[in-house]
Image: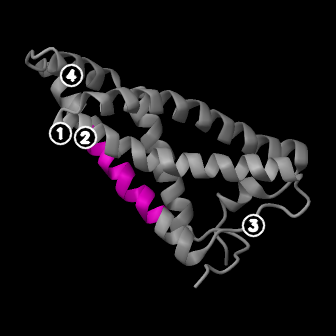
């Protein structure tokens, strides 16, 4: 059964969106410990004690992001999501939909790749994880700029939908 068409997001959907956004920012800001730990691990050295805690936090936060992202995806399929503004140009709708698909793929795939690397020593997964981090960074920048463009140039309500729950 297809998800219902909604005018806005639920409080839970909004909360999960911002929780994931904050946790991704934390991962970007505090990834150095994981890089140091991975470098030591991949060279067969002991992980430095000053990097171990940060690396473990990075891994745990990544797994939390995975759980929250899967929860978001479940809610999107069961509760639905508001459609893009009707008067939005077709190319912008295509970019928005493509960006959201890529965002979901990355926020689900990155923790899986990171876990494969960290917990199972899969070096190619670490390389893909690193590349994914770069793509995710620029996709998040595009996502933010797109929201600001919607708000201040197109004057749509897209930003409000992620701030005020549907009643």
Badge 1 density bin: few <14, some 14–19, many ≥20, Cα 10 Å = few
Q: Where is residue 131? Give x, y as percent.
A: 45, 27
At 30% from the left edge and 49% from the top edge, which residue is drawn?
A: 63
Please report contact status of discs 4 and 2: CB closer than 8 Å, yes or no.
no
Choose the circle earlier in sequence order: 3 or 4.
Answer: 4
- Local crowd size for mark 3, using a 10 Å CA cut-off: few (<14), some (14–19), many (≥20): few
Helix, strand or loop status at disc 2: helix
Left or right of 17? Residue 93 is: right
The residue singled out by tag 2 in the image is 116
Name above or below for residue 46 compared with residue 21. Answer: above
Picture quadrant of residue 38: top left
Whole-Å distance between the Cαs marked 1 and 2?
6 Å
Magenta residues span 59-72
Residue 119's disc number: 1
In the rendered image, the vertical position of residue 88 relative to residue 121, given as above or below: below
Labels 4 and 2: the sequence-earlier one:
4
In the image: residue 39, left or right of residue 107: left
Contact flag, marks 1 and 2 (Cβ < 8 Å):
yes
């Amino acid at each position: 059964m297809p998800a219902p068409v909604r005018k806005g997001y639920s409080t839970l959907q909004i909360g999960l969106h911002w929780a994931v956004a904050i946790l991704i920012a934390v991962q970007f800001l505090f990834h150095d410990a994981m890089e140091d730990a991975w470098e030591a691990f991949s060279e067969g050295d002991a992980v430095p004690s000053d990097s171990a805690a940060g690396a473990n936090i990075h891994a745990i936060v990544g797994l939390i992001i995975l759980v929250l992202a899967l929860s978001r995806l479940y809610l999107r399929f069961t509760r639905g999501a508001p459609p893009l503004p009707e008067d939005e140009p077709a190319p912008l709708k295509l970019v928005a939909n493509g960006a959201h698909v890529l965002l979901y793929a990355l926020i689900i795939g990155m923790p899986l790749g990171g876990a494969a690397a960290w917990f199972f020593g899969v070096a190619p997964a670490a390389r893909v994880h690193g590349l994914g981090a770069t793509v995710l960074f620029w996709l998040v920048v595009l996502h933010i700029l797109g929201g600001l463009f919607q708000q201040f140039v197109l004057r749509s309500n897209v930003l409000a939908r992620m701030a005020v729950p549907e009643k």
